[in-house]
Amino acid sequence: MKTLGNLLWLVLGGLIVAIIYFLVGLLFCITIIGIPFGLQLFKFASFALWPFGSKVVDGKSTTGCLPLAFNVLWIVTGWWEIAAVHAIFGVLCCITIIGIPFGRQHFKMAWLSLMPFGKEIK
């Protein structure tokens, strides 16, 4: 079932989202300061390709000042908007019964994109 969901996700826009996250991640990796943010966007791209069957969990390095500082910088620079967009698409997908699984995936992506540092995808 998750294979069918992943294939439908790719066809209905997941591939485009993954490509956008990957390209923006490449742009961030041009500068040394942007590399941690680019790596997080690569994590988003891999998650956007196959979200069904994946979970967002807290990683080993969730505590400490570095993940906290990067998460604050992530939110301050406007990446919270990505979380809001995924949450809005999640609500829109959940309007119909058929769209509920896709809405749940958008909610997982919103959770990941709110504070990505210290999170892992399993």
Image: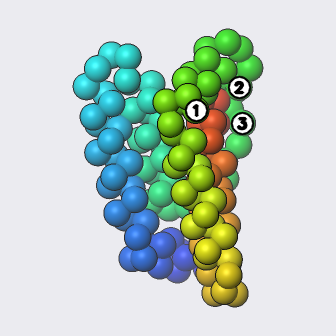
In this rendering, would 103 be left or right of 33?
Answer: right
Q: Nearer the viewer, mark 3 or mark 1?
A: 1
Instruction: Identify the element where label 2 is drawn.
Output: loop
For disc 2, the neighbor class at 10 Å (few under 14, some 14 to 19, many from 20) is some
Point 50% across, 61% down: residue: 50
Task: Compute the Cα span from label 3 to label 1.
Answer: 18 Å
Quarter of the image for residue 119 reads top right
* Three-letter code for the amino acid on which mark 3 is drawn: Asp
Task: Compute the Cα span from label 2 to label 1.
Answer: 16 Å
* Three-letter code for the amino acid on which mark 2 is drawn: Thr
Looking at the image, is 105 positioned above or below residue 47?
below
Could you tell me if the residues under marks 3 and 2 are in contact, i.e. CB atoms within 8 Å? yes
Question: On the image, numbered disc 2 is attached to which residue?
Answer: 62
In this rendering, would 67 be left or right of 10?
Answer: right
Question: On the image, numbered disc 1 is attached to which residue?
Answer: 75
Q: Please report whichever mark, 2 or 1, sits nearer to the chain's N-terminal start.
A: 2
Point 48% across, 72% down: residue: 9
Q: Please report whichever mark, 3 or 1, sits nearer to the chain's N-terminal start.
A: 3
| Frontmost residue, 108 versus 52 | 108
Could you tell me if the residues under marks 3 and 1 are in contact, i.e. CB atoms within 8 Å? no
Position of residue 85 measured from the top left corner of the image (x, y, whole percent): 54, 57
The label on residue 26 is none
Position of residue 7 measured from the top left corner of the image (x, y, whole percent): 45, 76
Instruction: Identify the element where label 1 is drawn.
Output: helix
Question: On the image, numbered disc 3 is attached to which residue?
Answer: 58
Q: Nearer the viewer, mark 2 or mark 1?
A: 1
| Frontmost residue, 57 versus 25 | 25
Instruction: Identify the element where label 3 is drawn.
Output: strand
Position of residue 100 measured from the top left corner of the image (x, y, whole percent): 68, 78
| Frontmost residue, 22 versus 82 | 82
